[in-house]
Amino acid sequence: MERCTIAPAPQPLCASACSVEVSVATNHIVERLKEQLALLERELRVELPERIRIARELGDIRENGEFEVAKDRQGFVSARVGQLQRRIAELSAIDISRVPKDRVAFGSTVHLAEEESGDERVYRLVAAEEVDTAKGWISPGSPVGQALIGKREGDMVVIRTPSGAKRCEITRLVTLHDQLEESAGDLNG
């Protein structure tokens, strides 16, 4: 069997200026994350300090289970707030000019035909927050995503999964640019 070189995980596509097109593509994710962030920030700044104050009033904090639970939750929520802030910044900084127009990359929809069986599959490379394997929405960092990154329509790829390696041809590639142009055409037409 032929060995396949799997492309390294893609580097973050960051730039100082946000791209309008990618903002549209990731806006719903960012909005959902901002909603989660707002809820957690409220819990961190309002609800948890009140729980901690009430627990302190109960007496000795060394043996106070409610105090311990509230402090543990405060640490967890604080860490999650930091994660959400970093992820929002990453998604907001994606620069569409760095996303390839002719190769598989973030946002691409890839149609594959398995060489041996002829089975066809469609994958879309999406942000981690959108992964849904039942729909074929995968992360660029997944084993299948890594095998596809940087490939072109007509290329043969070997996809290694827990169930074994499969040799497939990319029969159709729709990049993020193609999808955005199609959407713009729909709005203008």
Image (spheres, helix red, strand yellow):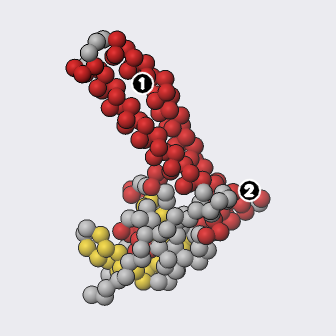
Residue extending farthest to the top is 58
Where is mark 2, residue-wise? 187
As displayed, is residue 154 above or below residue 182? below
As displayed, is residue 153 above or below residue 33? below
Q: In which image quadrant can residue 75 be found?
A: top left
Q: Secondary structure at mark 1?
A: helix
Q: Earlier in the sequence, mark 1 or mark 2?
A: 1
Left-right relation of 179 to 82 = right
Q: Mark on residue 48?
A: 1
User: Residue 47: x, y in percent?
Assistant: 45, 22
Residue 186 in view of the camera: no
* Quadrant of the image containing the C terminus: bottom right
User: Residue 81: x, y in percent?
Assistant: 47, 40
Q: Are marks 1 and 2 in contact (CB under 8 Å)?
A: no
Residue extending farthest to the bottom is 2
Q: Nearer the viewer, residue 144 or 52?
A: 52
Q: Residue at x 71, y 60 (%)?
A: 184
What's the CA distance linking mark 1 and mark 2?
46 Å
Type of amino acid at the residue the image marks with label 1:
Leu
As displayed, is residue 46 above or below residue 174? above
Residue extending farthest to the right is 188
User: Residue 98: x, y in percent?
Assistant: 61, 70
